[in-house]
Image (spheres, helix red, strand yellow):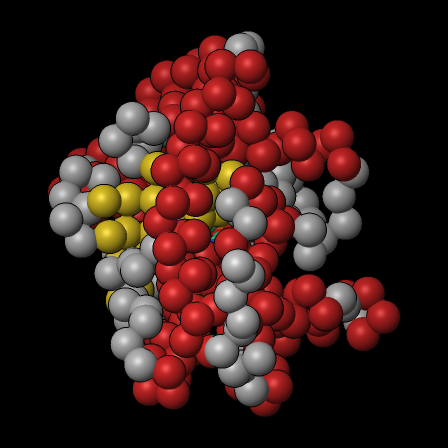
Amino acid sequence: KPRLYSGMQPSADSLQIGNYIGALMQWRELQDSYEAFFSVVDLHALTQPNDPAELRAKTRRTAAQYIAAGIEPSRSTLYVQSHVRAHAELAWILSTITGFGEASRMTQFKDKSARYGTDATSVGLFTYPVLMAADILLYQTDIVPVGDDQKQHVELTRDLAERFNSRYGQTFTVPMPVIQKDTARIYDLQNPTAKMSKSAESDAGVLWLLDDPAASAKKVMRAVTDSDGTVRYDRETKPGVSNLLVIYAALTGRQIPAIEDEYAGRGYGDFKKGLAEVVVEEFGPVRARALELLDDPAELDRVLAANAARADEVAGATLASVYDKIGLLRRL
Ligand code: TYM
């Protein structure tokens, strides 16, 4: 089977529905036809300030949400990035073949560093995409399903793989990003031209997977729309309604025109009520299952340990061949 790799940062207590629609739904579907590896990228999360106890909790919570959303740890390898040491080691090697200018062109870095200022921007934030490349390349990955904000990082990964292969001989599979066009970007409900994000400044526009259903319904009812009054998809002039339509369609598997027809001649109130029901129905069971899993952290940790052992084997083999090829002396 071809290989699939993807991951998420444990950067909040809950995932948001952009993560769910833009990534997790694809993961769940693709895990049948691929040998899949899904990581909770805790090393990446260190690029933001973290309370140690909270980081541990968020890491477990993220893993629990993967499982609750339908990733099966008996079929797919679901593990914590820092449990497999090869990630940090390969990241170092790859950093030595990454251009400073090349890394400087990553738009996510440019955005974040502009927001934080130079003093609060760490070198880790700068090399973040190199660690991501290491994640992907260690597993000889064929496809990387992500939302469109990660596309540039996967392209850097491809460049690094090709560069390494041409310098040292065939070592890495060159991965392809897989981006679901329609759902690649879910927007903030209060600010529908900005990406919904775990690290959004205000919570009002973010739908959390683990939120209380009543709270999510309320956020949907309060979502920003427009004064036009018709439920119609038009990204340019109706970003708020369009975003809600995309969410509605993604969660129900229906086409946008069918939803527009259903709400033709009815107001936004009805439409939002309909969407709130869809959201509650979809996330209610996911939330309940995640909380159940979190009730038994010891069992969750055991599952993660077994999966890390599986990941370690694959990653270790790739790393050993990399060390050999670039001329590091083998320890007897
Ligand atoms: P992260 O944790 O920011 O996001 C996890 C996944 O969710 C997608 N996503 C969205 N999709 C649609 N609409 C949105 N508003 C939205 N917000 C987030 C992201 O595109 C991503 O697929 N660097 C990565 C994590 C990572 C990784 C990897 C991913 C580390 N190593 C290797 C793939 C392969 C990140 O920060 O994702």
Q: Which residue lies furthest to the front in this view?
A: 332
The location of residue 23, given as percent across then percent down, is 36, 47
Count of number-bearing discs: 0
Residue drawn 55% across the image and 14% down it: 298
Q: Which residue lies furthest to the right in this view?
A: 119
Residue drawn 28% across the image and 76% down it: 170
Query: Of residues 233 and 118, which is closer to you in this image?
Result: 118
| 11 lies above or below 132 | above
The location of residue 4, given as percent across then percent down, is 28, 51
Residue drawn 51% across the image and 45% down it: 84
Query: Of residues 127 and 263, which is closer to you in this image?
Result: 127
Determine if residue 215 is in view: yes
| 290 lies above or below 144 | above
Please tell me in which quadrant of the rendered image residue 124 appears: bottom right
Query: Of residues 147 and 80, which is closer to you in this image?
Result: 80
| 224 lies above or below 164 | above
